[in-house]
Image (cartoon, grey):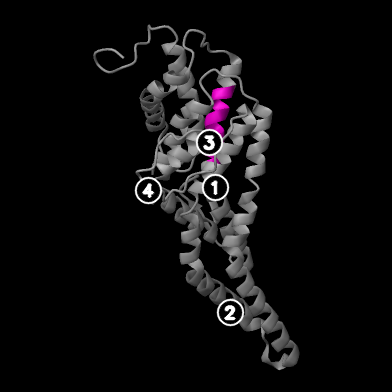
Amino acid sequence: MNALGLPDLFAPGVAAALVLTALRVGGLLLVAPVWSAKTVPMRLRTALLVIFAVLLLPAAKATAHLETLRITPATFLAESAIGFMIGLAGAIVIAAAELAGELMTNTIGLSGAAIFDPMNNTQGALLQQFMQLIAVMVILVGGGHIIMLQAIAQSFVSMPLGAPIHLGEGSKAMVLAARSIFVTGVQFASPVIAAVLLLNLALAVLGRAAPQLNIMSVAFPLQIGVGLITLSGSLALVVHSMSDWTPGFSATLESVARASRGVATAPALSPTAPRTAPRTAPNASPYATAVGAR
């Protein structure tokens, strides 16, 4: 650092370290929730990329071999992929919420109602956008946008700049972790799906027993009403479940790190762990440290 606190780009390896750090941060900003929103102007996103790269440079230099650090196609791809996978790990809860909203929209019968998606500048299902905004709110309130940046900083410990990684194994671990999107999405939507299913069964039995009642004329409004009432009643539980996304985020990053570098990591610390806990315990996961610090 010079007298102004800025990195000395003429020092050996510092310029390459800054570029590779920017690539890792850029991969995160490309797909991470909130940071990748279309509503964020490109100029602002570029400015954030430069600022975050400069701020994270000391952490990157602490574990990198600056004398041998070079910008090559392999390091270019590896650093971008690391940031990309960290962003994807944070986006799992958003994807699960969107899937749940899509399932509930189709189950209730509101699939014909589309609404503008402010995050992606597209049209989407009504409840899908509602669940997406709820998940984004939960992440912002819990400091998730800061936790992702902390994960970038801690990733320099297990995957230093320029170190060779196995992208194939890391991508495989990421795909396996992404399976939780479908499980979590169905869990979020299960109260509404179950309530509408029971309603349809009851209407079917009633319509069979008394055909003169013309059940089909009231089935659709009843289905929408029961679905929305069930959603409002279960929303608190869904939000509580969303707020506990950090252990899954930490576990996903640990599995990707193990697959990419063979790093032995300990179980993730709870995000509610006391702040007096040691920041760097022996064999502790750097990603669990980042989550526990929140």
Residue ID for mark 1: 248
**Residue 27 belongs to the span the image colors magenta:** no
Q: In this view, does 228 lie above or below 6?
A: below
**Residue 85 belongs to the span the image colors magenta:** yes
Residue lying at the far front in this picture: please name it.
Answer: 282
- Specify the amino acid type for callout 3: Ile
| In-image side of 17 versus 185 (left or right) | left
Q: What element carries label 3?
A: helix
Q: Which of marks 3 and 1 is nearer the N terminus?
A: 3
Near mark 2 (Cα within 10 A), the count class, few <14, some 14-19 or many ≥20, is some
| In-image side of 103 versus 207 (left or right) | left
Residue ID for mark 4: 274
Residue ID for mark 2: 222
- State the CA–CA distance, disc 4 to disc 1: 19 Å
Q: Is mark 1 on a helix, strand or loop?
A: helix
Q: What element carries label 2?
A: helix
| Residue 60 image point, x, y percent | 44, 22
Quadrant location of residue 15?
top left
- Residue name at image x 63 percent, y 45 percent: 178
Residue ID for mark 3: 86
Q: Earlier in the sequence, mark 4 or mark 1?
A: 1
- Specify the amino acid type for callout 1: Gly
Indicate which label's residue lies in the foreground, 2 or 4. Answer: 4
**Are discs 2 and 3 less than 8 Å apart at CB?**
no
**Are discs 4 and 1 less than 8 Å apart at CB?**
no
Quadrant location of residue 280?
top left
- Specify the amino acid type for callout 2: Leu
- Residue name at image x 37 percent, y 32 percent: 44
Q: In this view, does 179 lie above or below 58?
A: below
